[in-house]
Image (cartoon, coloured by chain):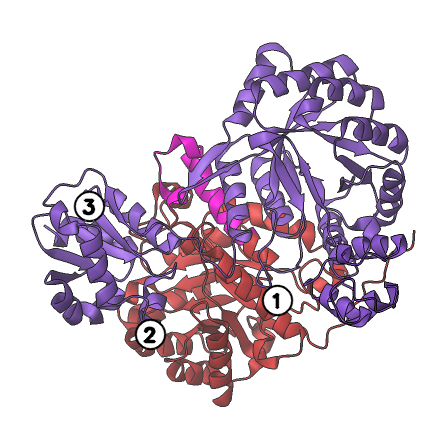
Amino acid sequence: MALTGLDIFKLLPKTNCKKCGMPTCLAFAMQLAQKKAKLEDCPCVSDEATETLAAAAEPPMRSVKFGTGDSEVQLGQETVMFRHEEKFYSPTIIAVTLSDKLAGDDLKKRIDDINSLKFERIGLHIQANAVAIINESGSDDSFANAAAAVNDSSDLAIILCSDSPSAMAAAVAKTAAAVPLIASASADNADDMAKIAKENNCPIVAKADSIEALAELTEKIKAQGVNDIVLNLDGKALQELLFSLSQLRVLSLKKVFRPLGFPTMSFVTDTDTDAQVTSATSLICKYSGIVVIDTTDHAAVLTMLTVIMNVYSDPQKPIQVDPKVYAIGEPNENSPVIFTTNFSLTYYTVESDVESSRVPAYIIVVDTEGTSVLTAYSGDKLNEKVVADAIAKYGVEDMVKHRKLIIPGYVAVMSGKLEEATGWEILVGPRESSMLPKYLQEVWK
Amino acid sequence: MPIPDLAESFVGAVNKVTLGATKEQGGTRTSTITVGGAKNVVYAGSPGDAGEKPVIAMDVLDVKPEDWPDILAEPYGDVLDNPAQWAKKCIDEFGADLICLKFEGIHPDTQDKDAEHAENVTKQILEAVGVPLILWGCGNNEKDNLVMPKVSEAAKGENCLVGTVEEDNYKALTAIALADGHHLITAAPLDINIAKQVNILTSDMGFPLEKIVTFQSTGALGYGIEYAYSIQERQRLAALSGDKMMAMPMICDVGFEAWRAKEAKTVDAPEWGAAQDRGPIWEATTAVCLLQAGADIIRMRHPRAVKAVKNFINQIWK
């Protein structure tokens, strides 16, 4: 929890020596509280004060990273309970299981299936980010071999799941450079597992069947010098798991209860694909930092990734596309010209409807700071000048021979002024983008 | 290790709303449905604070749907041009909790059907099924104001949920719903201030707040769901803080929105997985996502999606 200026003042030498550049220690404390000064500026500060202030500056939920390079993933550091308060910080990581019972072609196929879970949506790349290798075989060698195989033929981050310290040590030996997440330490093996994590500089999962037991376990792991911890509530049915995850979120963010100030990982245990999607959806929305799934069904995973994309989007800043002219299909000098705004949802809806019309067309995307047609128009971010400027700037007059511009039906009222400003004939298109195919096929002709 | 106490008490709660009137209550429904009643945010406090189980209203259209993708139409077989059979199938085979009769066919841009048609369909469905009904206009204000009062009258005493009323068009339907003993849906275009304003306007006409269900507008997964999601979360928080004008249960229109999504309806896109799975999964996920934000009644279309969402609901609300 953030300290007040007075809290900080109590920790300072109170000598008013002015070496920090401030007239008094109190003034310096106030500057510190507002993060306008650094503690290092005080040459006389005690070790105790340094420690206390550093601890207070820690985020309520720790940031944990695993994987390396492009495959590095990050979770934690969340600050709020609801996305309208502030953007959720770390998009949920989707991890897909891989049993170490698989070998040969089966193993290779599973890795390929997991690697293929990559998609493009509204111009963004989304994908499953991690492989959770499960020590189902009970054999140290099989586990280590599966881990090595994943490390060789996948660029995804690795989660090693075993309750056996010897299996874990064997698998970490083959993958340490890839910084796997060690899953898991439980009350029985915490010291051994923490030792492996410490020696290899890997983060670790703490696994227990209650919130109380988890809090004790993390203290035990921290005592071993491992601070990058992920929490896993084990063996809970979905209802209890979701209620517990909400409690954990409140404990870390609102109560700043340090033993539980860590992100979480949950396993989806349903066998049915539809149930995996619905369970994963609730875990994504309600505070699981990593969701481990079993399915590699593309429809299922695309759907989960879209949930993450939506729930973790910035509520203050809409996703935008670059304002410019987009060619859909292979338009020529006689093709229709449509304009819309650069709010990504608006643009991609229009793009998809133009695409499905099979009429090649140009879409002029005007810069409305990422707002939709009606919002932009009522905020004067969309007016005849903005559109005329875009036509000139992007050289639309050189792209087509005709001078006809299709405008969104909702801003039909712009027609007159727009015609004056551009010299183009204005055609009022449909209000709903979904009517565009019909419009382009029937009216444009 | 002792864990800090999280007990948090709110002054408000979501209203409980009971739809449908049985014979004893002056209607002909064989069962009623109660929604709402949550006393905390989703998954906070104890499961007992989660209120009544959310319910699924399956859509029945008054005319045969023209633009339904094959994958959506297929499970209905040959009942799509027979609203009564259609409704019966939703209840008997697909496990719907109630029926939402959507008057698509009265819209001037579709078939411009008249009030008599709408009354007839309403009566047929009341006869075919015993569950409570939602009666939902076509969205064209003029036409709805002509037809929906007749529909309301045709279902008088059945304690249906009728809608929708909006900021600039609420008087006609509010008055008749009040007279005919129905509940009312107040709608707003993803704007929490307008949502509250419509509730104030209808309550100024004497419509009881505890007989209102709000519709904040729904965005499908991938198509603006986050706006609906956050407004619903904010409505729940407002209800808990004691704002009587925002303490209503919420309804979402998931079926219609989800099946407009490119991912749901595009057949030829193997990189997105099999088409027959994609649509139902997209619809189910849209619904489950909105349940995380406190939805109480969900309008749905594909039976497989309904099954998946019911399965989810049954795990959480026991």
Indicate whether A68 appears above or below B90.
Answer: above
Residue behind mark 2: B144
Q: Is residue A280 visible?
A: yes
Q: Nearer the viewer, residue A333 or A277?
A: A333
Q: Which chain letter goes with mark 1?
A: B
Query: Mark 2 falls on what kind of element?
Result: helix
User: Which residues, given as a range, are shown in magenta?
Assistant: B262-288
> Pointer 2: residues within 10 angstroms few (<14), some, or many (20+)?
many
Residue type of the residue flagged with mark 3 = Ala
Residue behind mark 3: A361
Q: Which mark is residue B35?
A: 1
Side of A120 where B306 appears, left or right: right
Residue A177: say if magenta: no
Q: Are marks 3 and 2 on the same chain?
A: no
Q: Which chain letter goes with mark 3?
A: A
> Pointer 1: residues within 10 angstroms few (<14), some, or many (20+)?
many
The picture quadrant where one finds residue A34 is: bottom right
